Image (spheres, rainbow, N blue to C red):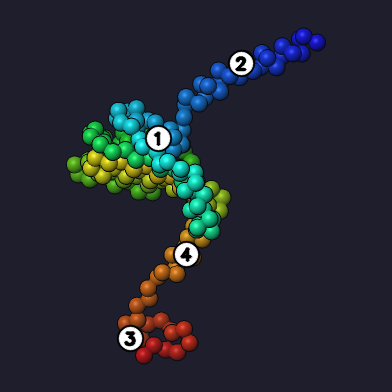
Amino acid sequence: MRRFVLIPICFLALAVPVVVLAGGAQGGFDGVVSSIESRYHVHAQRIPFLGLISFISHKATNGGVNGMHIAEIDDFHADVDGEELNKMVEQKLGAEWERVIRETSRKGDSQTLIYMHPEGQRMGLFVLDLDGHEMDVVQVSVDPNHLNESIGKYEHHHHDGDADAEMSDHGDAPE
């Protein structure tokens, strides 16, 4: 009977170091932020109560937005090699994320990286924006169909009065 008790204990003793070591190889949002903090010797400010804010945004947008992660780094004075930053972000996010925008100013003091990741019917967005001495890192999950409908409510249609103008709501040709 003692042997059967030792098996789970031995398994647990072997599993703990594996879990601890795997946690050190952090990826995703937290991995990117930790790598930036380590590489550039800065400290990221996490937004307090972000879980609550994310929940409220999920409810307020009827599921359009959720899973928000935000980190802000003030007093960012390091010189940034855009290529190095891009590679670091790609490595930590993983191959399933695709960069869609990379913008770098001539001086290198302004960098913007935007990545997308399909999540079934949703889309993951990751944005890193360095502007002068401030860096913002944001990750969010969005429902593109829901957001497109919401944004469509605010579109403004122009009527030029020419023959190609849209039909009015009543089906009449524009005047």
Disc 2 to disc 3, C-alpha distance: 76 Å
* Nearer the camera: disc 2 or disc 3: 2
**Which residue is more in the foreground, 133 or 145?**
133
Q: Quadrant of residue 78?
A: top left
Q: Is residue 159 left or right of residue 17?
A: left
**What's the distance in space between the residues labelled 1 and 4, CA to CA?**
31 Å
Mark 1 vs 4, N-terminal side:
1
Indicate the secondary structure of the residue bearing disc 2: helix
* Residue type at the position of mark 4: Ser
Give the alpha-carbon distance from disc 3 to disc 1, as whole Å.
52 Å
Pointer 4: residues within 10 angstroms few (<14), some, or many (20+)?
Answer: few
Q: CA distance from mark 4 to mark 3?
A: 28 Å
Give the quarter of the figure containing the C terminus. bottom left
Q: Secondary structure at mark 1?
A: helix
Q: What is the number of the mark on residue 161?
A: 3
- The structure residue drawn at horizontal position 39% and vertical position 35%, both measured from the top left corner, is 33
Question: Are the residues flagged by discs 3 and 1 in contact, CB closer than 8 Å?
Answer: no
The residue tagged with tag 4: helix, strand or loop? Answer: helix
- Would residue 133 be found to the left or right of residue 171 on screen? left
Q: Earlier in the sequence, mark 2 or mark 4?
A: 2
In the picture, the disc for residue 14 is: 2
* The disc label shown at residue 32, or none: 1
Residue 50 in the image: x percent, y percent?
45, 44
Asked if disc 1 and disc 2 are in contact, CB closer than 8 Å, the reply is no
Give the camera-side residue of 100 and 108.
Answer: 108
Residue bearing the label numbered 4: 150
Identify the mark nearer the N-term, 2 or 3: 2
Residue at (61, 15) in percent of width and height: 14
Sequence-first disc among 3 and 1: 1
Q: Are marks 2 and 3 in contact (CB under 8 Å)?
A: no
